[in-house]
Image: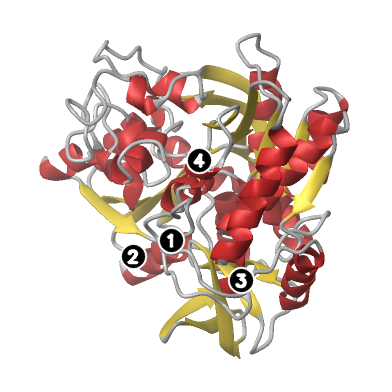
C-alpha cells in the first residue's frame, strides 16, 4: 500500500492529535465497564496494527477484528471449482494474488499451478478482460471475489461487455455482501458487542443507509471510519460518546470519502449485473441473502454453467487445529490458536486467515502480535 | 477488501485516467464515477476509481477537531507505531 499522503492528510496522522484523541477516549471509557467494539474490515485491522492503536486505548476497551476478509470467507467449493476449470484445456484462471496460496483439503491454486494449470495473478478485472482480448484462443476465467468494494468494478466490467462482447471471458461468481451478513451474525447469541466500526471503502460504494438496522434493531452505536489513525480514533471516540449518552446511531466519520447515498452509479451497475442470493462463507456455512449471483442476462458469463460443471458441495475440512472460523467472527484471537506463528505461518498457512493481507492472522503475524 | 489508495488525477482520457501519488503514475478506470477532472483526488481499488476524496470535507473534519483543541499539525506517526509517552 502506497504511503505518501495527500495534502492535509499528514494531519490525519498527527502524533499530537492522536495522543489527544486517545486521552479523550480514555475519559469517555471511564466507568463504563468492559466494552467491545468490532470492525469488519481487514484494512481496518491492518491500520490498527500498523499504528499500534490498541496500545493507546484504555484497558476496558477492546477492538475486535470481525469478518472483514473476503479471501478468508471464500468457500472451498469455489476454489475447487477454479481448480477443476483450470484442468480443462485452454482455460486460464485469472485471480487476485491473495487467493493463490489459500489452502484447501485438496490443495491450493498454487498447487494446481505446479501441476500444470494456467493460474495467473491479476490486480484488476480489467486485466482479465485485456488478457481475453489478447489471447482469443484461450478462455479467461476471472475468479471474482470480494465485498461491495470489489464487486462494483466487476459489475462495471460485465456491463461494458454488453457493448463489446468477449466470447472467451467468464467468471466464477464468489462475491459477498456485508450488511446482511452482519444481520445474521448479530442475531446469534455468541455475539456480544457494544459498537461497530463500519468499513470505510465498502461504505464509499453502499453509503450509510444500509446500516440503519444496526442502530434501529440491534441498538448498536456505530461509526463509519476511514483508515488513518485519526479516522479510527475519531470513530471510536464518537461511538463511545453515543454509548455514554445511550444513543444508537450510524455516524459517518469518513465524510471526505463516504456520501450517505454512497456511489449511486456503482450501485446501479451492481444491481444491473447481480442479485442477492444465499452465500456460503468458509467455516461459517450458508448465510442466507449474503451472496451475489449473476442475473439471467449475464449468466452467459458464469464459467461453471458455460463449461457444464456441477456445483460442488462445501467439503468438511479436516481438523488441522486451524481456528479460522472463530477468528473470522472475532470469537477468538489469532494468538489463541495453538498453531499461530508456529505450525501456521504465511509461508506454510493452515488456513486462509494466515494467507490474505486482510486476514487477521496474517496481519497479527506481520506486526508481531496484538498491538 | 477495503484497500483503496487515494491518488490525484493528472489526465483524463475518456473512461480512463492517469493518476499519480508520490511520483508514481498509473492508468485506472473512471467508469464508476459520474465525472472526474484533472486535479481531483480519487480512491483507487483494483484498478478502478470507486469514489472521490473531498479535500474540503477533509479540511472541515480537521478544523472541527482543531476547534476542540485537537490540532493535527506537527509530527506525524510512522509505521511502527506510536510511543504512548510521546517520544
- Drawn side of residue A64 relative to residue A117, left or right: right
Give the CA separation, mark 2 to mark 4: 51 Å
Can marks 2 and 1 be said to lie on one chain?
no
- Front-most of residues A87 and A271: A271
Residue at (17, 25) in percent of width and height:
A343
- Residue under mark 1: which chain is it in? B
The residue wearing badge 1 is B87
Q: Earlier in the sequence, mark 2 or mark 3?
A: 3
Give the CA separation, mark 3 to mark 1: 18 Å
Residue at (19, 45) in percent of width and height:
A117
Q: Find numbered disc 1 in the image and state the secondary structure of the residue it sits on.
A: loop
- Drawn side of residue A78 relative to residue B68, left or right: left
Q: Find numbered disc 2 in the image and state the secondary structure of the residue it sits on.
A: loop
- Residue under mark 2: which chain is it in? A
Can marks 1 and 4 be said to lie on one chain?
no
- Tell us which disc is closer to us: 2 or 1: 1
**Residue A183 in view:** yes
- Tell us which disc is closer to us: 1 or 4: 1
The residue wearing badge 4 is A54
Q: Earlier in the sequence, mark 3 or mark 4?
A: 3
The residue wearing badge 3 is A11
- Front-most of residues A57 and A189: A57
The residue wearing badge 2 is A136
Give the CA separation, mark 2 to mark 1: 59 Å
Question: Disc 2, disc 3: CB below 8 Å?
Answer: no
**Residue A270 in view:** no
Amino acid at each position: 500500500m502506497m504511503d505518501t499522503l495527500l495534502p492535509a492528510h499528514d494531519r490525519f496522522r498527527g502524533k499530537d492529535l492522536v495522543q489527544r484523541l486517545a486521552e479523550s477516549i480514555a475519559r469517555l471509557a471511564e466507568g463504563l465497564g468492559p466494552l467491545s467494539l468490532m470492525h469488519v474490515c481487514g484494512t481496518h485491522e491492518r491500520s490498527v496494527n500498523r499504528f499500534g492503536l490498541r496500545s493507546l486505548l484504555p484497558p476496558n476497551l477492546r477492538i475486535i477484528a470481525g469478518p472483514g476478509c473476503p479471501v478468508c470467507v471464500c468457500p472451498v467449493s469455489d476454489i475447487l471449482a477454479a481448480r477443476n476449470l483450470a484442468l480443462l484445456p485452454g482455460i486460464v484462471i485469472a485471480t487476485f494474488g491473495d487467493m493463490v496460496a489459500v489452502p484447501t483439503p485438496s490443495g491450493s491454486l498454487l498447487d494446481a499451478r505446479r501441476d500444470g494449470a494456467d493460474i495467473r495473478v491479476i490486480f484488476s478485472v480489467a486485466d482479465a478482460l485485456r488478457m481475453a482480448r489478447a489471447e482469443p484462443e484461450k478462455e479467461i476465467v476471472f475468479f471474482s471475489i470480494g465485498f461491495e468494494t470489489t464487486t462494483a468494478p466487476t459489475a462495471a466490467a460485465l456491463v461494458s461487455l454488453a457493448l463489446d462482447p468477449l466470447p472467451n471471458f467468464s467468471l466464477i461468481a464468489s462475491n459477498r455482501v456485508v450488511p446482511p451478513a452482519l444481520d445474521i451474525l448479530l442475531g446469534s447469541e455468541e455475539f456480544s458487542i457494544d459498537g461497530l466500526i463500519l468499513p470505510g471503502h465498502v461504505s464509499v460504494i453502499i453509503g450509510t443507509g444500509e446500516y440503519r438496522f444496526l442502530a434501529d434493531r440491534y441498538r448498536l452505536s456505530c461509526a463509519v471510519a476511514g483508515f488513518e489513525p485519526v479516522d479510527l480514533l475519531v470513530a471510536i471516540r464518537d461511538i463511545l460518546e453515543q454509548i455514554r449518552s445511550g444513543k444508537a446511531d450510524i455516524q459517518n466519520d469518513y465524510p471526505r470519502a463516504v456520501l450517505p447515498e454512497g456511489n449511486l452509479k456503482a450501485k446501479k451497475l451492481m444491481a444491473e449485473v447481480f442479485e442477492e442470493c444465499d452465500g456460503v462463507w468458509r467455516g461459517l456455512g450458508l448465510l442466507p441473502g449474503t451472496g451475489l449471483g449473476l442475473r439471467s442476462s449475464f449468466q452467459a458469463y458464469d464459467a461453471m454453467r458455460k463449461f457444464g460443471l456441477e456445483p460442488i458441495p462445501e467439503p468438511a475440512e479436516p481438523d488441522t487445529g486451524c481456528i479460522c472460523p472463530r477468528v473470522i467472527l472475532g470469537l477468538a484471537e489469532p494468538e489463541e490458536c495453538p498453531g499461530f506463528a508456529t505450525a501456521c505461518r504465511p509461508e506454510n498457512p493452515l488456513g486462509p486467515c494466515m494467507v490474505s493481507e486482510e486476514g487477521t492472522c496474517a496481519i497479527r503475524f506481520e506486526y508481531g502480535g496484538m498491538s | 477488501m477495503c484497500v483503496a489508495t487515494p491518488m490525484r488525477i493528472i489526465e483524463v482520457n475518456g473512461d480512463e485516467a492517469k493518476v499519480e501519488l508520490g511520483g508514481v503514475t498509473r492508468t485506472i478506470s473512471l467508469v464508476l464515477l459520474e465525472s472526474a477532472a484533472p486535479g481531483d483526488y480519487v480512491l483507487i481499488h483494483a484498478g478502478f476509481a470507486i469514489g472521490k476524496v473531498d479535500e474540503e470535507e477533509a479540511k472541515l473534519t480537521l478544523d472541527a477537531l482543531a476547534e476542540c483543541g485537537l490540532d493535527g499539525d506537527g509530527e506525524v506517526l510512522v509505521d511502527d507505531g506510536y510511543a504512548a509517552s510521546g517520544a
